[in-house]
Amino acid sequence: MTDFFATAKDLLPETVELRRKLHRNPEVGNDIPITRGLVLEALEGLPLELNLHETTSGIAAVLRGGKPGPTVLLRGDMDGLPMPEDTGLEFASEHENRMHACGHDLHTSMLVGAAKLLSSMQDEIPGTVVFMFQPGEEGHAGAKFMLEEGLLETTGEKPTGGFAIHVSTWFPSGLVSLRPGPALASADEVRIVVTGRGGHASSPFLSLDPIPIAAEIVLAVQTAITRRIDVFDPGVITFGSIQAGTTNNVIPEQAALIGTIRAFSPETRAELHAILERVATNVAAAHTAEATVHIEPGYPVTINDRDFTAMVSATAEELFGGEMVEEMESPIMGAEDWSYVMNEVPGAMAFLGSCPPDLEPGNSPGNHSNLVVFDEDSMATGIALYAAVAFKHLGS
Ligand SMILES: [Zn+2]
Ligand SMILES: [Zn+2]
C-alpha cells in the first residue's frame, strides 16, 4: 500500500507554494474567482473531471478509480475573512481588509495535495473521489449552495461518506483531534425589537422607555437558559449588540438587541428559540410595551458519524502514531456549513493542530485573529489524512 504520509511529505513544498499564493490573495464570500483560478491551475494535468459550479465559485473535481466501488466526498473550504492582517508575514495578504485568518488557504492546498496523491494511485482506488472546493464558509453557506446545485449527484451516485479537516492553533502541530457525535454547534441569529413610546428623558412616566425593558430581557434570557436548558445538552445565547437612543435627554421609541444562538442538538436549539420568543414578548408585556422576535436560522449542528469517526481515528493512528491522535473532550461552540453535507452523508470533520512549534497551543493567536500564524508543516498530515481516509472508506 502507498505510504500516504511519506508521499504527502514529498508534496509539501508545492503545497506550501500554493498556500502562500492563496494567502496573499484572500477572497470573501461565494464569488471568489482568483482563488478558483489558482486551484484550477494547481489541478492542471491531473486525471480529474472538473465541474465548475455556477451559483458560486465552487468546484467539484472527480477522480474515478481504476476499480469499481462507492463514492466518497472530501471537502476543503477556500474563503477568507473581511478583516485586516497584521502578521507581518512575508506572504501576508496583499488586500486591505481581507485575510485568510481561519486557515482555509491550508485546507484548499491540502485538498489539492490529496487530489495529486490519489491521482498518482488512481488504478488502485476502488471507487470514486469527489473533491469539493467550497467558497463562502464564513457565514455565506457556500456548502448549502453547492448542495442545491447538485453536489451529491456529481458522479451519478450519492457519496456514502464525507470527510473534512479544519486547522486550529489550539492544538500542537500535526495532532489530529476529533470526536463522535456533535462536533460543532448550530448558529442562528436573533433580532429583538422592543417598542415603547419616545419622550423627554426627565419625565419617563409620560413616555414608555424601551431601554430598561431591553436590559431586563437580556438578563431574563440568561436566567431562563440556566433554568430551562439541560446542562448536559448546553446552549448559549449572547447579545453582541444593543442599539437604542441618540443622546442623553431623549427617550427613544425603540431598542434593538442582536444576538447569536448556539446549540449542539435540535432539541436545545428549538428550546432556545422558544425561550427568546416567550421571555422577550412577556417581559415587554409586563411593562405594557411590545417586543418582536425575529430568528434567522443559520448553520445546523455538525454531527460526526460514529463509525466513520472511528475509522478516521484508526487511520490517523496507523499513519501518524497513537500519540498524534486524540479524542476531543467536548465539541466546539463555533459553527460550520459542513453540517449541511453531514445532514445528507455520514462522515466527519477532524481538527488538525497547526500551532507553530515555537508557540504555545491555545495560548497563541487563534483562528480569526489578525495575528494568527499556522504551521505549514502540518499540511503533510492533512494531505495524508484526506487521501488515506478516502481510500480506506472506499475499500471498506
Ligand atoms: Zn472561520
Ligand atoms: Zn473555518
Image (tube, rainbow, N blue to C red):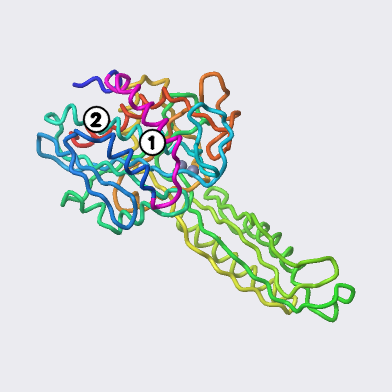
Left or right, 86 with respect to 130, comes to right
Q: Residues within 10 Å of mark 1 (few under 14, many from 20)?
A: many
Q: In which quarter of the image is residue 68?
A: top left
Left or right, 62 with respect to 248, comes to left
Instruction: Of the two numbered discs 2 and 1 on the same chain, state the one appearing first in sequence.
Output: 1
Whether residue 322 is situated above or below residue 208 in the rendered picture: above
Q: What stretch is highlighted in magenta?
A: 7-31
Report the amino acid beneath label 1.
His
The N terminus lies in quadrant: top left
Q: Residue at x 36, y 31 (%)?
A: 18
Residue topped by disc 1: 107
Residue topped by disc 2: 116
Report the amino acid beneath label 2.
Lys
Left or right, 62 with respect to 166, comes to left
Q: For this rendering, which residue is in front, 255 or 283?
A: 255
The secondary structure type at the circle numbered 2 is: helix
Residue 22 on the magenta span? yes
Q: Where is residue 315 in the image (x, y as percent from the top left)?
A: 30, 28
The C terminus lies in quadrant: top left
